[in-house]
Amino acid sequence: MLQYFQSYLRQPVTPGEAGNYLWATIYVLAVIIGVSLVVLTMNWGERKALAHMQIRLGPMRVGPHGLLQPIADAIKLLIKEDIVPAGADKPVFWLAPVAVVITAWTTLLVVPFGRTHAITDMNIGILFMLGTSSLGVMGIVMAGWSSNSHYPLLGSLRSSAQMVSYEVAMGLTVVSAILMTAMNDSGMYLRHAESANGLAGTLSMIGIVQAQATQGTWFVFKFFPLGLIAFGIFAVAMVAETNRAPFDLPEAESELVAGFHTEYSGFRWSLFMLAEYSGMVAVSSIAVTLWLGGWLRPFATVHGRRIEIPHYWQGGALDFASALLPALLFFGLALACFLAVARMPKLSVFRLQTVGLALFGALLGFVGVVLLAPPVRDRVQDVFWFGAKVAVFMYLYIWYRATFPRYRFDQLMRVGWKVLLPAGLAVLIATAVVGVVL
Amino acid sequence: MKPSSGDGAGRTFLDSSELVLNMGPQHPSTHGVLRVILKLDGEKVLGTECIIGYLHRGVEKIAENRTYAQFNPYVDRMDYVAAVSNGLGYCLAVEKLLNVEAPPRAQHLRVILAELNRIASHVLWLGTHALDIGAMTPLFYTFRDREEILKIFEKYCGARLTTHAFRIGGCIYEAYEGMEQEVLQFCDFVLPKIDEYEQLLTTNRIWLDRTRGVGPLNGRDCIALGVTGPVLRASGVKWDLRKAQPYSGYEQFDFEVPIGENGDTYDRYLVRIAEMRQSVRIVRQAVASLPQGPIMAKVPKVIKPPAGEVYVSVEAPKGELGYFVVSDGSTQPYRVRVRPPSFVNLQALDTMVKGQMVADVVAVIGTLDIVLGEVDR
Amino acid sequence: MSMAVALLAAEAGAGQTMTPVATGFFFYLLSALAIISAILVITRRNPVHCALSLIVTLLSLASLFLMLYAPFVAGVQIMVYAGGIMVLFLFVIMLVNLERALKEEQFNKQWLAGVAVALGLGALFFVVYRNGQNLFPGTPLELPEAQNTQQIGLGLYQNYLLPFEIASLLLLVAIVGAVVMAKKRS
């Protein structure tokens, strides 16, 4: 049993590539559970971060510092009455949230958390992700229509028009990133006989990160400033694609139309929310993979002086520091928990919360200790760096929501078609020309 | 805004005839219970009709059955956001009927409180207006600053919102121990905060897109419609009652009246921000030159003004707030007619919103800074 | 052509190919799904249900492309056809007055002629299949997946560049025409 486990762990490919159904299923479950945990964390994190930016505290009562708030919300949504509007088209009404969640989770099939830490690696990986995202638009249209009310219909049509428009700009910048995979170190186009895997350029997600590794630079820094501009355009388009502030007019409360999920309550609404946050994770993963080097740590080619610790580490100093980072992160979180425990009011009503927070801190510390063990430490490296970069994007999403006013719908469409699309085209042409000329 | 369903049933969206949309009495922002019926052609607004009266409480009728002093608390409830100006206007009107003038110290105190009140009103306006346009965060910052002003009010007269701070003939409460320091501290506190708001919004591209060119109103239309206050000044008309017809000692203070150019939402925003800064300036001068002396003039115990009528108006934060008081010689007024600035400004909504988009209607209602308590009375 | 592809596959290494699994089962399943949803497209009363069934048909076709080792075509089919064109179909259907559509007569009077023509077409297909059977290879070609995007790219931009440019010009004409028609005459 252990041998089987260990022999699997030594394989150099993802389970999908190896055709290993058992492990592929396990990875699928792990990704689904992981994304659900991320959604819960985002729920808590968004409310706390928004609150702190608005000089208030956010949830504090449900669990220490509101840590149990997402669970309370989930329970509330599950036990809510399931209302189906009169005259709604029942099969489509039922199908819409299901379709949105399924497409959102299907995009996560090819997200590369590491060289072997993906469910599978298709060689049309990025095309698959963009295609399944565009299928998600259909679920939103269905939701608005099946509510049998003018205003969700209008909101869903606006929402989907916005998503479709920004998909175009996203696609163009993605193509310019793909172009960069077909070049060697000095920027020249590779003929496919010369390139590393026999194919010049690739659409596969793992292949794109490997191209960044062989070229020694993250694509955001390649052909400066072209990579940066392409990344910037994608970063704006992905916020509009996921219907988040400042592009959230179709679902804003103070506007005329309340949005496509008005008539959905309880569990169905929570499915939409799940799909929205999963979509955020998916497009952030695309951005991280294409421009920010995926699972590669910063300065992956610099290894530092060789350090030898018997039974523990043989390798470069910088690699060693980066290997310790996940454990240090969890130790830092545990320390923050203990500091918060020390600052809790010393009244008997807070005893349960104080004890709970201390236990939570101890749990985080335990996870940190586990992450120091060599087998875990090495395997977790890739996932940690990928997760850290996606977490930065999630925080940016929250920051945008707190700071920016909302675009009016026609201004939103103007930005998508008249600003981002020409800019994306220009970056694409410039990248192509630079690759030939250089 | 809960739109009523059943509108245009059987009509398809591809028809280019006009669609009638109801922005119902309930709003997500604090404007109050205002119902607006919009005639739309697709996204464009062809015309509006405001239906008011949801907050009508018969204040003016009540006035006929109360004595002059008894009616004083009622006026605060009209513009409940900025209650001090209401009280100031009413007291000035009755004092004019009685032909008394408040002593200088009382006038200074009144100016201090009225200008603090202006800052409080504008700051609340800024928070709610930004929220309407989608920026959630300024609301919390502005309410924090408003809190400081309300603390001062509470220490002075015991109430935060409906202050009833003045009496006919002057002030009843002396400045409390340490009030001058606290007011000056507040002035030092709020100026960087106003800079913070400007930093968040004034050059923000999205804010500019949402407010520039939205809801334009030129000076001539303003005068024709009777619009007053920051709306009038943002359209380029130089008219501020504190300069044009000074009352309560305003002529002693040195301050500017900010004027806008285009009369759009962005200019109204800039004008109100500038007015806040000028209010701080006035407050500082008023505190520095606060004279000693009595705070109440010699007013008879039973207020029985001679028969006559008087119209007195003050520059409330929202515009010209006027009181037309008719006395028949008895202890109760014969008629108190209030000219609320929000009521008259609201009539400009139709002109401002014609030809604009539906999403701008919310922004324009916000920029007019109406309080339904005043509109409906 | 196929020999060249097979040689390239041998060169490129076997890492990218997978042995096919349960091909027969998946083929029958996907074909049945495609046929059933296609029948649903023409028989459902509600136009939105028809559009959704069409989406299922297109997705089954995309999966069939995948089985034929053409992942790029499958991906583009999903992205453009199911994700783009069908969403636009749904837009239009939803904006048009649905109540009238639901009450309309579903089959028109000439259904007998329609059935006769369909039977004739089926007979034609059958005859062609019978006579041309030996033109199809006995076992499906095992093309390495990695080559599909390459081959399409090489074909489009080297061998068939002129038709590609003309096709894009056609699309431009269509877009301009749509914009001109949609502009209101002011």
Image (cartoon, grey):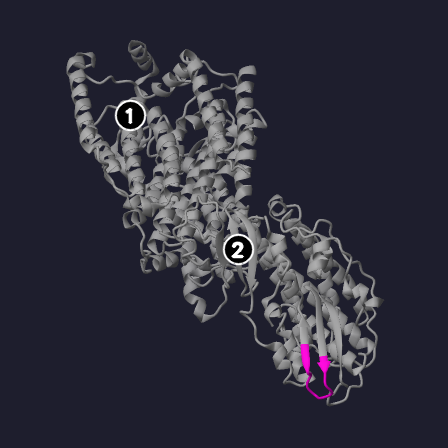
* Amino acid at pointer 2: Leu
* Parent chain of label 2: B
Quadrant placement of the N terminus of chain A? top left
Q: Indicate the position of residue B72 as horizontal and vertical percent values.
A: 67, 80
* Amino acid at pointer 1: Phe
Q: Residues within 10 Å of mark 2 (few under 14, many from 20)?
A: many
Q: Which mark is residue B38?
A: 2
- Magenta: main secondary structure: loop
Q: Report the span colored magenta.
A: B326-336
Q: Indicate the position of residue A199 as horizontal and vertical percent values.
A: 40, 18
Q: Residue at x 54, y 46 (%)?
A: A408
* Parent chain of label 1: C
Q: In this view, does B289 lie to the left or right of B123?
A: right
Q: Indicate the position of residue B187 as horizontal and vertical percent values.
A: 73, 63
Q: Indicate the position of residue B237 as horizontal and vertical percent values.
A: 76, 56
Q: Which residue is drawn at 45% across and 40% down?
A: A161
Q: Residue at x 51, y 53 (%)?
A: A255
Badge nearest the viewer, 2 or 1: 2
Local SS, label 2: strand
